Structure formats: C-alpha cells, structure tokens
Image (cartoon, rainbow, N blue to C red):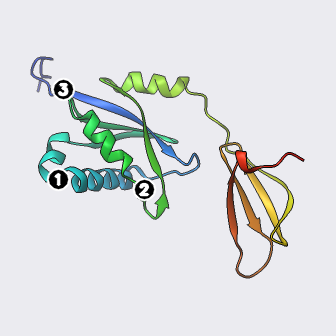
Amino acid sequence: MSTRPPTLREKRRYLLVRIEPAGAFIDQKDLYYAVSEATTSLWGDVVAAVIMTAVVASDGQYVIIRCQRGTEQDLSIALSTITKCCDIRIALRMVSASGTIESLREKIRKIPTPSLELRSSCECMFDKKSFQTSQCNGQKIDVIEKGFKNTNRLFLTREDLEEL
C-alpha cells in the first residue's frame, strides 16, 4: 500500500503541553482518557469527534497531543480544565503548536530542564510546632510536621520564605 500524496492527507496539528507540577509523571494512556473526558464534557461528543485528540508521545514532564488543524484552540481550552489524572492533581499548560512532531521535540531539547533533587534544609517552628523542610529546585517547598500521629504538611512558595 502506497502513502497518500500530501494533498489527500488529513491536516493535523501537534500541541506541546507541559505537565505541572514538575515532579508529576502520568501514564500516557491515563492522560489520554483525561484529555478525552475533558474535551467531551466541555464541547460535547460531536465537537470531540471533530477534534480527534490523541496523546502521541510523552517525555518526562512534556506531552505531545495530536488534533485536527483548526481545532487547536478548542483543545487547549479543554486542556486547561483538567485538574486531576489518576488521583494526582495536575495542570496542563500548552507551550507550543506545530505541524510536525520533530519540531516540537527540538523545542523540548532547547528548554532547560530544572533538576528535581530534594534537599533537606533545616528545622523550623510554626505555631509552636516543629517542622522539617524539604526544598525542591522547582517552585515549592514542602514543610512536614515532625511527629507520629496527625502529621500536617504545609506547602510554601519561594516568596513565603523569610531571609535569615
């Protein structure tokens, strides 16, 4: 079977999407189900069939999603409504759109990847309770209460830190 000439092929677009938070790794199949459900619930079955979404590739925190040409905006709006996948809270942010997968893979290579190593910093006190901090090179700092029962967890950003 020979390939179709370019004039007879379906026109498709590929979206480069970033998964946030930086450490959340989602299975490609589960992400497809979340994208499909979000598209159907927002736009309905008819428009979701026209969009024809497919999760083509995933590379760490980046995912490439395929759709029909002209429906990129509808798909990006549907992606912004996704808040959870497999009981993991995530957000999908569209980075770029292109006509080829290879150009999106080049963009992934050009984007500097932050290292996700955790560094245990120090102990701190909040509300007369002792907490241990775990700092990630991303944007968040986890503060975990020391103790055996009813362990509380606080999530702070870099702006919440005080200089010593």
| Left or right position of 80 against 54 | right
- Left or right position of 117 against 146: left
Question: Residue at label 2?
Answer: 83
Helix, strand or loop for disc 2: loop
Q: Which amino acid lies under the numbered mark 3 shown in the image of this protein?
A: Lys
Residue located beneath label 1 in the image: 44
Disc 2 from disc 1: Cα separation = 19 Å
In this view, the residue in front, 26 or 1, is 26
Please tell me which residue is depicted at 32% across the width and 43% down the height of the picture: 77
Dot placed on the residue nearer the N-terminal end, 2 or 1:
1
Say which element carries label 1: loop
Tell me the kind of residue under disc 1: Gly
> Which quarter of the figure is the N terminus placed in?
top left
Callout 2 amino acid = Thr
The image shows residue 106 at horizontal and vertical percentages of 47, 22
Picture disc at residue 11: 3
